[in-house]
Image (cartoon, helix red, strand yellow):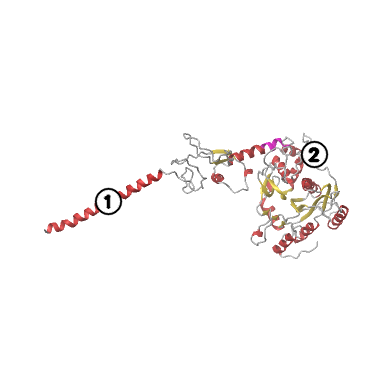
Amino acid sequence: MNIMRFLLPRRWKSCCLKLAALGVLLVVNVEVLRRQACLEVPIQTENHPQSSTVTEEFPQPPIHIDNHTQPPNIEKHTQPHTQTEKHTQPPTHTEKLNLNFTHPNLTDHLQPPSHTNQQPRPPINTRNRPRPHTHTEKLSQNHQDMDRVMWEYPLSVNLSDVVDRILNGKSPQVKPVHNTTKYTYITNPIHTCRNSTVTTGQSASFFLLFLVKSKFDHFKNRDVIRRTWGNESLVIGLAKTRLKTVFLLGDVPETLTGRSDIRDKLKAESLQYGDLIQQNFLDSYFNNTLKMKMGYHWALTYCPSAEFLAFLDDDYFVDTPNLIKAFRTNISRSEYSHVVAGFVVRYDSVKRNSTNKWYVSPSEYAYNNYPPFAIAGSAFLHRSAARRLFTGMRFTKPFKLDDVYLAINAWKLGIEMRHWHGIYQVPVRYNAVTYRDVIAVHCFGNITDALRLWQLKYGLLTRKV
């Protein structure tokens, strides 16, 4: 009896352990069966991200799965890529994969999974619309358009070679398309940039020349600019930096009521300030290309010692100290002849709707996209780049959109359009943090708002010049 009492607890413990082990095996088998059953159900990509062969740290594009449990094969394709293909739009999933490519001239693009042994899927909609362009196809189309602009947009020449020959005193060996100095000056302040202390009339040295495109009747806009960002005496902390401001105008339309009175006011304004540059072409929106060319001609002819040029519209607020700082830090000396800075739009599509303000017919421009361009209201460059561009304009067919025309010349000459942060195309409410790095703000229909901004930023009481 004593022996039985000793053995019973040991047998009881052994039975309990065996039962526990059987329970664990049963739970594991049930879980395996449950998972196998789940695999038979089609996976919804919205709720269950599919595994991929791509590194896990990159976000994956949505993948459409046709009841396949195997992960799709992702194929890598290399496409040529240049620095000019930077887009202002937010990067797509495909573009995010380009961050860590090893070769500077190659990019990797994801392609949709291919199921070679499966039947094709039915169309997504009954209209059977063509699929949208992929990122790679868009880049390819841009390449084709830009290559055509480079070689086919008149003149069909190597523009860089033509310009280099002229600047080196040689014959261009081709005839120019047009004369960039066709129009004559009504008002020309030729003494504005001359040094009054030198009897020979030598040009004074300026760091920055503002060339402001202004409409003939925008008297108030010009007055505010003279009292704020265009006034050399109000550039705080930059006493050694010399700047000059001039305004670019066309002629008053002959059919305008009160034309003679406006012309008299312009003459008086010119006598008082000596900063109006005016030629005898009609002052209208689509003649802004003529204003721009007039500005280049005047700056290179009558103010050749100005180191940097800033082309602006007269409805801008400009933070002059920040602009000067940007010129000094954002463009190196080796880039002076190869960069135009501003608010850059890349590969904008051509407007073919005749009701659109910026409509362009195929006879004017035969391609689908424009080269990257700095919006005309604000374009900043060194005088050496300006000299190359203005020389090239003689051999490039005129175009009615001035910023696009400049971009066509820049593209054919290999000059980069560089986007500067701190330039806004819509009014921005004043904030000390935001305006700390602001360079320029556009679209002040009421120019007094630009005046208030200057006072808020610098706390200065403006005065008549």
Tell me if mark 2 has few (under 14), some (14-19) or many (20+) residues whose alpha carbon lies within 10 angstroms of its own: few
Residue closer to the observer: 33 or 330: 33
Residue 403 spot, x, y in % from top left: 72, 46
Q: Residue at x 71, y 65 (%)?
A: 459
Contact check, label 2 and label 1, Cβ < 8 Å: no
In the picture, the quarter occupied by the N terminus is bottom left
Magenta segment's dominant SS is helix
Q: Is residue 105 visible?
A: no
**Quick check: is 294 in the magenta stretch?**
no
**Identity of the residue drawn at 33% across and 49% down:** 28
- Of callouts 2 and 1, which one flags the residue occurring earlier in the amino acid sequence? 1
Q: Is residue 201 left or right of residue 422?
A: right
For the residues labelled 2 and 1, the Cα–Cα distance comes to 95 Å
Q: Is residue 112 above or below residue 314?
A: above
Residue stretch in magenta: 147-153
Q: Amino acid at mark 1?
A: Ala
Callout 1: 10 Å neighbours few (<14), some, many (20+)?
Answer: few
Residue at disc 2, secondary structure: loop
- Badge 1 is on which residue? 21
Q: Which residue is mark 2?
A: 178
